[in-house]
Amino acid sequence: MDKIVIYDYETTNSTIWGSIIEVGAVVVDKNLKEIGKLNIRGRMPEGEVPSAKALLVNSTSIDLLTKGNYSHYDFLGALENFFSKAGPCMFLGWNNTNFDRFMTHYNFFKGNRYPYITHSSPNSEHDGIHIARASQIINPETLKTGLTDKGNPSFALESLATAQGFDTSQQHTGFHDAFTSLLILRIVKNKHKENWEKFLISSTKSGCETLLKREEIFSINEIITGRDYPYLVCNMHPNHNSHLFYKKSNDRFVFDLRNDPEPLLNLSIDELKSILDKTKPKIIRVMKINKAPVFLDKQCALEYKYPKGNPYTKLGLETLQKRAKMVRDSEKFSQNIQTIYREKEEQNEQSKSQEDKLPEETLYDKFIPNKDTALFKTWHSSSWEDKLRLLDKFQDKRCSWFGQKIIYQEAPHILPPDLYKNIKSEIARRILSKNKEKWQTIGMAYTEIDTLRDQASNRDDQDELKKLDEINEFIMSIEKKYEIA
């Protein structure tokens, strides 16, 4: 990929109910030389209750939250436009596959925009923290690292920046964190010239599939009790190495070669399940090919100094290769693994609450029809009056609801009085709820502020106490507006 977009978000909340309010991005060429950038803030959308802790972390004042140049709608439009023009490219952040990517998904979904822009062809997406962890397994001298509270090497961006001696005065702002990610990746690339391109191959699912088919034996990196360890694994039978449960379709099973597969190949499903449940470390490991796992050479695990000795070198390469062939050739064994994991997920699904989901929660339950995604561009380019009329054109009722809410937030005077009242009442029902909800309610916000006040008082942090007073007043203003809805 000739271009990489290294990006970072700041948000009002760390859940799917939060909103992106700041984005920083650096566009670089394949040599990691800067060729473009983005650094913008947006206002929080109407009808949302922010997390006080999030606002403190990313230094967002109430003025910034409510009086920025971009409304949330315009902010998402600018972000989508930047990402679209940057492509085709690889998107990359720091722990982005576990946070920023999903914030894109849900914010774009709620904004009637295509949610998967960062990793749909021709774009791809990788994660800087995966690359950094893999590089450190290969060469522990790649990066200087601080320690976590439990004494393990810390790969948190702030900790790595401090250890490298970088300026951290603007940490937890979008552009600063994106640029810091770039600086760290430049160190990794410089020290791993021979591995850099290999690190990037898994930025697409097809790249992962190619590696699974090509590599006889390889190492993967997993975090166990806060520390990275390499595991020597092999692919399962190529026709039966994927999860059969539809919500886990991006999972691929690999076999840890410290285990002898021969006694397992012809066991019944119940017998095999019992052994899998009680064996530690795990016999079967799961690779999520949509989250850019890094494939490492077999030598990483073979040469690693484990605390209790290397379980792989004791066996010898010939034995390991025989085990790998045995696993790959056993169709029945791989099918049994698929069945065990599918049944487990089906049981988990059945145990979940059966209450009706709100539209915002249903992104991964069903795709938006192509007819509706094709309508997005026309809808966004239309006047507010035409946006209202076009809502009936959406086949997916979720798109209609999101469109109504966007108009309520951006041009409420356009809405018929009954529709305006219904939307406001629904927002009030959610944020004034006395229950512990998945989203942030007014009551939850007050509780969070009280807890943070106690902590700030114990530290005698007068500056933070003042900020919390401002946030509290803002929450009170939201409550006052919606308590009469």
Image (cartoon, rainbow, N blue to C red):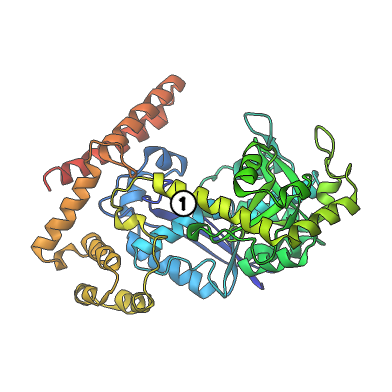
The answer, for residue 70, to whether it is visible in the render is no
The answer, for residue 362, to whether it is visible in the render is yes
Query: In the drawing, does residue 251 fall left or right of residue 402?
Result: right
Q: Residues within 10 Å of mark 1 (few under 14, many from 20)?
A: few
- Label 1 sits on a secondary structure element that is helix
Quadrant location, the N terminus? bottom right
Query: In the drawing, does residue 335 fall left or right of residue 430?
Result: right
Between 430 and 235, which is closer to the camera in this rendering?
235
Q: Which residue is mark 1?
A: 346
Between 437 and 419, which is closer to the camera in this rendering?
437
* Residue 176 x/y as whole percent: 56, 51
Task: Give the residue drawn at x 46%, y 47%.
Answer: 347
* Residue 401 x/y as whole percent: 25, 63
Query: In the drawing, does residue 306 fall left or right of residue 3?
Result: right
Query: In the drawing, does residue 456 fall left or right of residue 133?
Result: left
In the image, residue 404 above or below residue 257: below
Between 180 and 301, which is closer to the camera in this rendering?
301
Q: Residue lying furthest left in this view?
A: 417
Q: Amino acid at mark 1?
A: Glu
* Residue 277 x/y as whole percent: 62, 39
Number of numbered discs: 1
Task: Give the residue drawn at x 39%, y 29%.
Answer: 452
* Residue 175 x/y as whole percent: 53, 55
